[in-house]
Image (cartoon, rainbow, N blue to C red):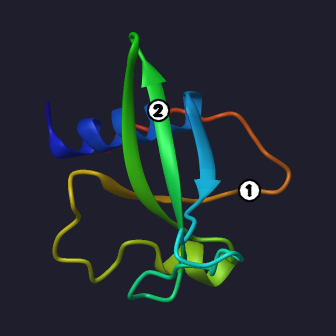
Amino acid sequence: MTARLWTAAFAAALLAACRAEPVQNDAQAQPAARLSPAGLDLAQLTVESGGRRHAFTVEVARTPTQQEHGLMERRALAPDAGMLFPFDPPAPARKAPARR
């Protein structure tokens, strides 16, 4: 599977079966917001599929500027990491057009 197809399949799986919860700091009574090195909020995301659970720590790109920048300039991404792009109002996932 090519990298583009793998990325599209992964994104579709996240959108189809995900639940994001804020990361909590157990050391404090009031959980503090955790930020990524890029300054984005971090959230725990669990994908349940085929009777299995897959846990991820994702960055949340909330603003249009954050979404536009996305994962640019990233040289690596951990296997259990990713990025969410919330839209308001929510919309169903669409298949990306094929590139020629």
Amino acid beneath label 1: Phe
In this rendering, is residue 40 above or below 24?
below
Q: Nearer the viewer, residue 22 or 12?
A: 22
Q: Tell me: 66 left or right of 11.
A: right
Q: Residues within 10 Å of mark 2 (few under 14, many from 20)?
A: some
Name the kind of residue labelled 2 in the image: Val
Quadrant in the rendering for residue 72: bottom left
- As measured in the structure, the alpha-carbon distance from the residue carrying label 1 to the one carrying label 2 is 19 Å
Quadrant in the rendering for residue 13 = top left
Q: Earlier in the sequence, mark 1 or mark 2?
A: 2
Depth-wise, is mark 1 or mark 2 nearer the camera?
A: 2
**Depicted 11 relative to depicted 28: above or below:** above
**Residue at image x 31%, y 44%?**
7
* Label of residue 87 in the image: 1
Q: Residue at x 54, y 68 (%)?
A: 26
Residue 22: percent from the left, percent from the top?
A: 62, 61
Image coordinates of residue 2 in percent, x first then y, are 14, 38
| Quarter occupied by the N terminus | top left
Q: Which residue is mark 2?
A: 47
Q: Residue at x 39, y 49 (%)?
A: 56
User: Could you say which is closer to the camera, residue 38 or residue 1?
Assistant: 38
**Crowding near pointer 1: few (<14 within 10 Å), some, many (20+)?**
few
Secondary structure found at label 1:
loop
- Camera sees residue 96: no
